[in-house]
Amino acid sequence: ADIVVLPGDGIGPEIVAATLPVLEAVASRYGHAFSFAEHDIGGVAIDRHGEPLPAATLEAARRADAVLLGAVGGPKWSDPNAKVRPEQGLLAIRKALGLFANLRPVRPHAAALGASPIKSELLQGVDIMVVRELTGGIYFGDKTRSETEATDLCRYSVVEIERVVRSAAALARARRGHLTSVDKANVLETSRLWRDVTTRVMRDEFPDVTLEHQLVDSMAMHLLSKPRAYDVIVTENMFGDILTDEASMLAGSLGLLASASLGSGKVGIYEPIHGSAPDIAGKGIANPYATILSAAMLLRHSLGLEAEAAAVEAAVSSALDAKVFTADLAAAGQGVDTRTAAQAVV
Amino acid sequence: ADIVVLPGDGIGPEIVAATLPVLEAVASRYGHAFSFAEHDIGGVAIDRHGEPLPAATLEAARRADAVLLGAVGGPKWSDPNAKVRPEQGLLAIRKALGLFANLRPVRPHAAALGASPIKSELLQGVDIMVVRELTGGIYFGDKTRSETEATDLCRYSVVEIERVVRSAAALARARRGHLTSVDKANVLETSRLWRDVTTRVMRDEFPDVTLEHQLVDSMAMHLLSKPRAYDVIVTENMFGDILTDEASMLAGSLGLLASASLGSGKVGIYEPIHGSAPDIAGKGIANPYATILSAAMLLRHSLGLEAEAAAVEAAVSSALDAKVFTADLAAAGQGVDTRTAAQAVV
Ligand SMILES: CC(C)[C@H](C(=O)O)[C@@H](O)C(=O)O
Ligand SMILES: CC(C)[C@H](C(=O)O)[C@@H](O)C(=O)O
């Protein structure tokens, strides 16, 4: 399988470098051949090529079986009014590859509960899959700016809603059979369309999956007060951005959360949900588990290697059980380095 | 002082009825004269007058010194595609009175910490004031709907941003001198304008108040992981809606959170941030504290009665210290009724 590797900025190169040996171990243990081709994206691509998503990167990603990404952005390129910004590379590659469904599983690991701000007794048994719509909504609508005002347009089409709801419902069917759709239908027209389309798709195509609608503001509460009540959550781009970062707190550390961005084809982008963490970049102390768990999702969703994916997930669990913790999870002043944590998984 | 009372729907009438005796006690104790005029808003107004904000209600509110509101909405009027909906009344009165700054204080009370999903040690000393922009953004932009798609426009003007940032900064100056502005400037044009205007207003007019920018997704995490780090938070309408409901979890119960919606005039709307709770409506068990604390904000912000406001807040604190808890705060199966809790405050 051909895997395109996009280390990006900040801690991106470190966590990706720590993850490749895990994929190599899978290849040799299970008799697969993986080839890795590295390309630039984000700030590093701006520095080297003048643009956050060079054509060569996009072309390679299009031809690959899967893309493993580190993180983009950093203080060097952080002026929000700059013409080219690292984040544009990320948004552009998601859009260009048609990756409309962003899967973000949240399953707190027993050994990491201490690091969560949430009371541990609420977290036992939590197993949520958030499916965030990734190529529509206000992120990609027309923008205007004048001396006196600015605008952003939020647009959703029936087709965009149908396809992400189908992805989420299919996941729910293979899990506990419950889907929670999140919108702001009491205020937004796009949310009323979202609710109508979701209701119809679920009634016609997934009568065996229970459907519940939640308003985004209530959801921001319930996610904390009764996280066990949720199975699969589906929502639009911006709400998904906010709710998944909030949900990450259930898992103890952002350093444990993986994601997969999928479309209708086979190629997907796999990346940790955390950012480039410029404050600790270059120190070799970043938590590699989220990237390794993203690689597990890559094995599962793009390569169809379920047993291999499960083995990687089990290995991360064992490392956590053995308290192989990087600084974000360990007691203050303690913690192993990135390589040691990744080596424990290998 | 003339106070317009809008009980609204669900538990609204009960919690407002429980709060008026508190204001009457203040009037008699401190020698003030308060008159109360009741009007319809929300679902009850749709039923009686065919519209969620009757002209008589708006006129009365315009002439009043302050408005005390219960809650609007309920299953009877909950079809999001209905032509008239209770929420429209709330949005319309906020807009018509020009109430652009929605103040939502979050100060967990020691006796209620047990009810919060957040670990108690993180909550000690938390004292946050969220200022949510209330009459702009995607809530009030043009909306379209066709067979195949829907749109909502998010618009912010320089003037709209300036005035709410000034309100928030003035509050920060009178508190701990720190302002956190929340946006999504790495993606949205309205957020880039928000960041630019905020930076300029703070540099030119509030050099003594420290300013920090946060992205809304990160903020959804930090609010949980380090709530003590925040003093005043200012943000746009939709982000404020989501973040304040999330922040309510810090306080243990939504039943403890008050709000004030202020404009450039004296009149303001004071309402609990919780909704109409149709599931417990009519049972007399709703928590009245959030409405009583909203009445305290009314005394402070619209009537300029600081000592009276502080006395009401102290009385609620004492009731909580004495564990006079309604069902939302009490152990399962326990809790006093609405009147008993309110009477403890009186
Ligand atoms: C970097 C940013 C554009 C991105 C997003 O908001 O989609 C990030 O926050 C994420 O969630 O992947
Ligand atoms: C009822 C709804 C329109 C309202 C809002 O979103 O503003 C409510 O959630 C609130 O926060 O006051």
Image: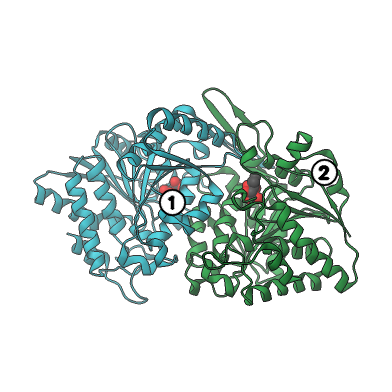
Chain colours: A cyan, B green
Which residue is drawn at the image coordinates 18% and 43% (left, top)?
Answer: A305
Location of residue A269 (image quadrant) = top left
Q: Is mark 2 within 8 Å of ligand 2?
A: no
Instruction: Tell me the subunit letter for badge 2.
Output: B
CA separation in Å, label 2 and label 1? 40 Å
Which residue is drawn at the image coordinates 29% and 65% (left, top)?
Answer: A284
Instruction: Tell me the subunit letter for badge 1.
Output: A
Q: Could you tell me if the residues under marks 2 and 1 are in contact, i.e. CB atoms within 8 Å?
A: no
User: Closer to the observer: label 2 or label 1?
Assistant: 2
Instruction: Give the residue pinned by disc 2.
Output: B58
Instruction: Give the residue pinned by disc 1.
Output: A244
Location of residue B57 (image quadrant) = top right
Secondary structure category for the residue under label 2: helix
Residue furthest to the top? B147
Q: Is mark 1 within 8 Å of ligand 1?
A: yes
Residue A16 image point, x, y percent: 27, 54
The kind of residue tagged 1 is: Thr
Q: Is residue B193 above or below residue B273?
A: above
State which quarter of the image contains the C terminus of chain A: bottom left
Q: How many marks?
A: 2
User: How many other residues sit within 10 Å of disc 1, few (<14), some (14-19) or many (≥20)?
Assistant: many
State which quarter of the image contains the N terminus of chain A: top left
Numbered badge on residue A317: none
Residue A143 appearing in the image: yes
Residue situated in front as seen by the camera: B282 or B92 = B282
Residue B228 image point, x, y percent: 55, 70
